[in-house]
Image (tube, grey):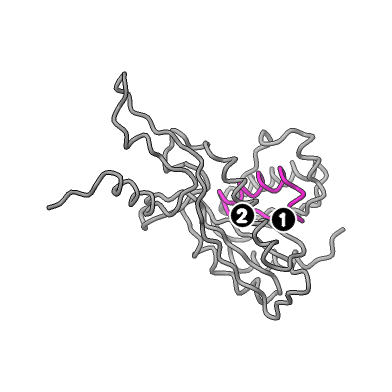
Amino acid sequence: MRRCPRWLFIALLVAVAGGAATVSWASAQEPQGGGGEEDVYVAATSLLRTKVLLPVGYDAGGGHTVVVGLHGHGGGLFDFFVPAPLFRDAGIIYAVPQAPYAFLTANGVGYSWNLRDVDDSAADQGDEVTIRYILEVVAALRARYNVGDVYLMGFSQGGTFTYRTAIANPEAFTGFATFGSGFNDGWFSAEELAAANHLRAFVAGGTEDSFARQVRAHASLEAAGYDVTLHEFDAGHTITRPALDTFIAWLGRVRK
């Protein structure tokens, strides 16, 4: 049987990984000098899918609210796209980008916004690359559609990157929403946090999902001057239909 050339085998592995934003190439090389083996991650351009559902009566001449949804760790684009009709019916453009890093789960292939569970030794490496990718998604939506307000929404790990992306880049957003996500005061200086306090914020979590994390996030944002809404719903680590209905209603309220 003819053996597959090494270069072709490596290319196939990269393709199966789902177009990750970084490629581990060092493991394919022969050990050098001291015989040690390492994985080196290099930022690379790749095309990743973002699914978009336009609202009923989409008007290319009028600015529409956009919600960009970031799925949780181990989830994927398609499962987070399920509630898209709720946004469509509310006149909102809903867009879900695919996280860049694929890994195996008990149920198949899951995706992560950083290298956690992909390569735990480099778990937080590439966070800034991911934040730039999310901003590029927003820029692409603005270029393609007639966009008004833009909100970033995330669940669990997607909520972590919602906080880190929106607060660090407040000029790109009108506001943000997180579900089942913690907030780390160490992510930002007091000045950085205050500089983004014109953003509207919606912080939500289930009663059976360490809701104290959302209470702490609400307190930190409120202390920094944010217009922040805290919403508790009866569930575990998930997003329920009533919670989404509450969020969509919140989106339609007049800003203070």
Magenta residues span 154-179
- Which residue corresponds to mark 1? 202
Task: Give the residue displayed 65% in from the left and 38% down from the top.
Answer: 184
Q: Earlier in the sequence, mark 1 or mark 2?
A: 2
How far separated are the C-alphas under marks 1 and 2?
Answer: 11 Å
Mark 2 Cα shell of 10 Å, populated few (<14), some (14-19), many (≥20):
many
Q: Is residue 45 left or right of residue 110?
A: right
Q: Is residue 223 left or right of residue 44?
A: right
**At label 1, which amino acid type do we have?**
Phe
Give the percent coordinates (x, y) of residue 23. 43, 42
Q: Is residue 209 left or right of residue 231?
A: left
Q: Element type at marker 2?
A: strand
Q: From the viewer's side, name the closer residue of 217 and 119.
A: 119
- Which residue corresponds to mark 2? 154
Vertical position of residue 81 compared to residue 159: above or below: below
Task: Give the residue displayed 29% in from the left and 48% down from the top.
Answer: 9
Task: Give the residue displayed 77% in from the left and 52% down from the top.
Answer: 228
Q: Are marks 1 and 2 in contact (CB under 8 Å)?
A: no
**At label 2, which amino acid type do we have?**
Gly
Task: Give the residue displayed 30% in from the left and 45% down from the top.
Answer: 7
Give the percent coordinates (x, y) of residue 90. 70, 74
Vertical position of residue 242 compared to residue 71: above or below: below
Q: Is residue 163 magenta?
A: yes
